[in-house]
Amino acid sequence: MTKSPSTLGIILFIATMIIFFVAYYFFSGINYFDISLKINAFVLPILYAGGAFWSVKSFWNQNRVVSFKDAFSRAFVPMFIGGILSIFSIYAFLNFVDPDAKKLLNYQYVQRQKTELDTEYQSARKIMKHQKDIDELDKKYKERLPSFSPEAIKGKDMLTASHFSGYFAAILIFYVVLSVFFGAFFRTRTVYQETENQE
C-alpha cells in the first residue's frame, strides 16, 4: 500500500515526538543533553532516511515510469513535513510548556563545552615539552575560562527561535542530499527499464 507523502510526514512527526518524550520522561537527568545529542545524530537520521526510502520505494513499485522529480519529492516531502512539525512542537514545548527542561539543556550544553575545553587543555599540556608553549597554552586556557563563569552563561540560550531556525536549515541540507540520492537512484533504474521495454 502506497501512503501519500504528507501521511508519511505525519507518521514521521508522531514517531519523532514519541522519541522526544521518551527521552524527556526517562532520561532527563544528568545525561539529558548527551542522550538528546545521540538521538539527533544517530536515531532520527535513520528514522527519516527509512521513511524517505519507504515513500520512494512504495511509489516506485507501483509505477512503471518514475522521474527524478517524482522520486525526489516522494523522499523530500515526508521528511520536510515530519521535520518542520517536530521542530515547531519541540520549540514550543521547551519554551512554553517546560522551561526548566530548556534550562537543564542549556546548562548541560555549557558544561559539555567546559569539559571538552578542559580535556583538550590537559591533553595538549601533556605532550608539550617547551615551557614557552606551555605558558602560551595556559594563557589561552585562562582567557577562555571567564566565558564559563555564572555571569557569562546567565543569558546563554541555545534554544531560541533563531537557533532552531539554524538547526532546521542544517537538517534541511540532509533532507535535500538524501532526496537527490534517492531521486538519482530510482530514476536510473526506471530509465534502464524503459530502454529495455522500447527495444
Image: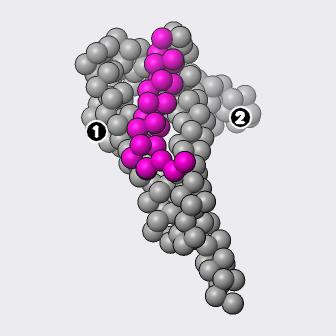
Please provide percent x and percent y for residue 47.
Answer: 56, 39
State the residue at coordinates (25%, 19%). Answer: 96
- Residue 42 visible in image: yes
Residue that label 2 marks: 128
Residue that label 1 marks: 162
Secondary structure at numbered mark 1? helix
* Separation of marks 2 and 1 at Cα, in angstroms: 40 Å
Residue 24, magenta (yes or no)? yes
Q: Which mark is residue 99?
A: none
Residue 124, image quadrant: top right
Quick check: 5 left or right of 45?
Answer: left
Please provide percent x and percent y for residue 164.
Answer: 34, 37
State the residue at coordinates (36%, 18%). Answer: 102
Residue 104, magenta (yes or no)? no
Amino acid type at image mark 2:
Met
Label 2 neighbourhood size at 10 Å, few (<14), some (14-19), many (20+)? few
Q: Is residue 31 above or below residue 11?
A: above
Counting labels gives: 2
Q: Is residue 22 above or below residue 42?
A: above
Amino acid type at image mark 1:
Ser
State the residue at coordinates (33%, 29%). Answer: 89
Please provide percent x and percent y for residue 53.
Answer: 58, 51
Pick the residue in front: 144 or 136: 144
Start and end of the magenta stretch? 1-25
